[in-house]
Amino acid sequence: MNFSQLQKQLGISFKNERLLQQAFTHSSYVNEHRKKYFRDNERLEFLGDAVLELGVSQYLYREYPEMAEGELTKFRASIVCEPSLVSFANDLGFSAYILLGKGEEMTGGRNRPALLADVFESFIGALYLDQGFDVSINFLEKYVYPKISKGAFSHAMDYKSQLQELVQRSKNGNIEYLITDERGPAHNREFVAEVQIQGKVAGTGYGRTKKEAEQRAAKKALDNYEAR
């Protein structure tokens, strides 16, 4: 397999191309080529998982200063879960480079979600070993962080929808969100949002955007409801 096209596409040149090949080598391929020296990607997957978690964790910690530990954990889990990793791998065309055994290939292994997710983590592990943590973060900044900032994983933190469902089930009336205050200079603005249910304040939240403040207000309303 020639990985030069992939490196050109990603703008990354591996010092040790064997690491890159290993990241895309499935155990089924190794088992069918025992006479040659191949290593599968399982150990790289283990390392890449840790690098990815740290990279995503530091991004969320920096970009969402108002978010509590439990919320950060839930948010991170939605980003590093299998469906998300498969999406990243597919966006980069990783499936075309996977080295598979014939049996695995015939049974559709190239497009199997678990296998694609593993390959994405393995690639990050290989990149970390070959280029270091800073280059690994640069890769995440280019291919992962933008999806977070665009709201691709916001479903995991959609407290407004959760509150809407709760209110509809309990038939408590209408929900209304109000921006009650704006603080700070234009480059560092903070908004204050209030959620009202049936005309009564149910929760207040703060955020760097109006949407974030409304989500925080909805979260507070949910917390207040659970505390009853």
Image (cartoon, rainbow, N blue to C red):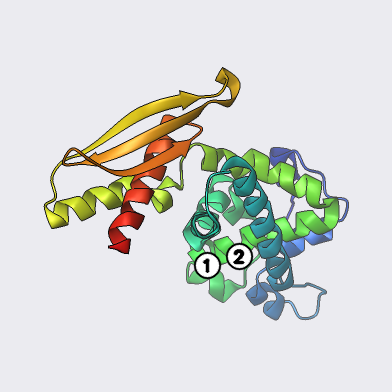
Residue 97 in which image quadrant? bottom right
Rendered residue at 29%/39% (across/down) = 195
Residue 161: x %, y % from top left: 29, 47
In the rendered structure, which amino acid carries the disc numbered 1?
Ala
Residue 205: x %, y % from top left: 41, 41
Vertical position of residue 10 compared to residue 78: above or below: above
Residue 180: x %, y % from top left: 36, 28
Read off the residue under disc 2.
118
Element carrying mark 1: helix
Rendered residue at 79%/56% (across/down) = 128
- Give the label on residue 78, or none: none
Rendered residue at 55%/73% (across/down) = 104
Residue 43: x %, y % from top left: 73, 72
Query: Which image quarter holds the N terminus?
Result: bottom right
In the rendered structure, which amino acid carries the disc numbered 2?
Asp
Residue 6 in which image quadrant? top right
Read off the residue under disc 1.
114
Say whether marks 2 and 1 touch (CB < 8 Å).
yes
Element carrying mark 2: helix
Q: CA distance from mark 2 to mark 1?
A: 6 Å
Front residue of this view, candidates 216 and 75: 216
Total labels: the figure holds 2
Query: Which image quarter holds the C terminus?
Result: bottom left
